[in-house]
Image: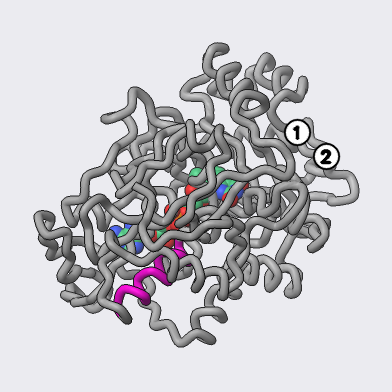
Amino acid sequence: MGCLGGMGTSGLVSAFDPLANGKEMLVGGIMRAIVFKLYDRGFLSPREKPEIFTKKYMHWTPFQAEGYKLVLDELVEEAGVEVRFFTKVIDADAEPSHGFVNGLIIQNVEGLCFVKGRTFIDCTGDAILSDLCGVEYREAGKDTPRIMPATLCSYFSNLDKSKYRNVHTGDPRLQQAIDEGMFTQKDRHLPGMSMVSDTLGYLNGGHLYDLNAVNVKSLTEGMMKGRKIVREYLAFYKKYAPGCENAELVCTAPVMGVRESRRIVGEYELNYEDYIARREFPDQIGVFNKTVDIHAYDTSDKEFYRYLKEYEHTAKLNPGEYFGIPYSILVPKGWKNLWVAGRCASSDLRVHGSIRVQPAASMMGQAAGTAAVQSIKTGQAANDLNTETLVTSLRDAGAFLPQKTLSAKMTR
Ligand SMILES: Cc1cc2nc3c(=O)[nH]c(=O)nc-3n(C[C@H](O)[C@H](O)[C@H](O)COP(=O)(O)OP(=O)(O)OC[C@H]3O[C@@H](n4cnc5c(N)ncnc54)[C@H](O)[C@@H]3O)c2cc1C
């Protein structure tokens, strides 16, 4: 695409999941700096303030996607990072038996190009690079019975902030609209519309069930269906949500909002027992509090109540708590110069339902980048990196890593 930010910009997913746990801000480093920059520039929702997003429990921080693009451009310019937009990784020269990547083939307006490198980080969400290299992974729908639904996000204008009251999951007006036949699918789970400015709203609404993000036919059908469904939500919000009477659809995202596709098999697979135990790791590169959030797989009662129970009760961490994200979930098992960060990191399905979101993805990204630099400087392989050094570097860069014990060896 023509911007950085992935889902947060191109995908119009214009809210950060909880950055804090009710007691303290868990997300430090680059992500914290970005949120403050967005705030200083007026690119966060008008109601957002540092005392809210640095502290509040289970609080979402809405932002303007255009502002986020600009801030990311400025940050990479300041840091001297060379960026190539509109450039796709289409193949890799890798040696799976040695766990080594020699280079990539990229494709853009200039044609095809082979790029050699010493370290590589896969932040494609769908583990595209890992797949091209021959890394082992688990794929939704193949290695799991179902695929968490996707959503095509959208922006609405002409909202009246002074009157706006969101209508979302559990609101009787949603059921009333379903009963009236306003929707082609009887979807009672509606994350809702967040105000990102005084008049603009970002809608996270309309599930695309069983969409397969690594199948182009499925993706194409999903985009077309998503655009139809958004029109139904426009009519619904105009009728039922105060402040949305004059709402207009500005745009739908140019890319699909994918929640689940592939998770690599890493040196460690973070699991639900770790999460429930609020386990801390000597090599943790981030701590997080977001609850397991696996959207209903279909519109049935069974799925709706399964989702609600897990999200609201069984899997919820309390205020002040957190669990650790270890370094070893970023390293494909056996690989020496390849890392992943974000949605395709190594975890079981339920933990993926927590760490798949933007603040956790950003912490993983900073850790993978820092690890790659350490690897280049010291010659240490990704799967044999001194994690005591890594954690110290991340702390120096502002990460909140409260573990008391460090270890040179990663968690396995
Ligand atoms: C509908 C929806 C609502 C969500 N709501 C929230 C929310 O409220 N708050 C929150 O924090 N998170 C939310 N999430 C989760 C979150 O947005 C994503 O899971 C997260 O952004 C994933 O980050 P990532 O860096 O792993 O991947 P992405 O953000 O998807 O970034 C992947 C990047 O890789 C690029 N790419 C892909 N393939 C290639 C290739 N072959 N070559 C080169 N580049 C490539 C893409 O263009 C993109 O820039 C939501 C997700 C969805 C789908």
Residue lying farthest to the right in this orientation: 162
The image quadrant that residue 349 belongs to is top left
Residue bounds of the magenta highlight: 365-376
Provide the residue designation for mark 2.
Answer: 165
State whether the magenta stretch is mostly helix, strand or loop: helix
Circle 2: residue type: Arg
Dot 2 alpha-carbon crowd within 10 angstroms: few under 14, some 14 to 19, many 20 or more: some
- Residue at 79%, 58% (x, y): give it: 48
Residue receiving disc 1: 167
Q: Residue at x 60, y 37 (%)?
A: 291
Picture quadrant where residue 147 is located: top left
Q: Nearer the viewer, residue 294 or 389?
A: 389
Beta carbon of the mark 1 residue lies under 8 A of ligand 1 = no
Residue 369 belongs to magenta span: yes
Residue 67 visible in rendering: no
User: Judging from the image, what secondary structure is the residue with disc 1 in?
Assistant: loop
x, y percent for residue 55: 77, 54
Regarding mark 2 in the picture, which secondary structure is present there?
loop
Amino acid on which the number 1 mark rests in the picture: Val
Counting from the top left corner in percent of width and height, residue 266 is at 31, 48
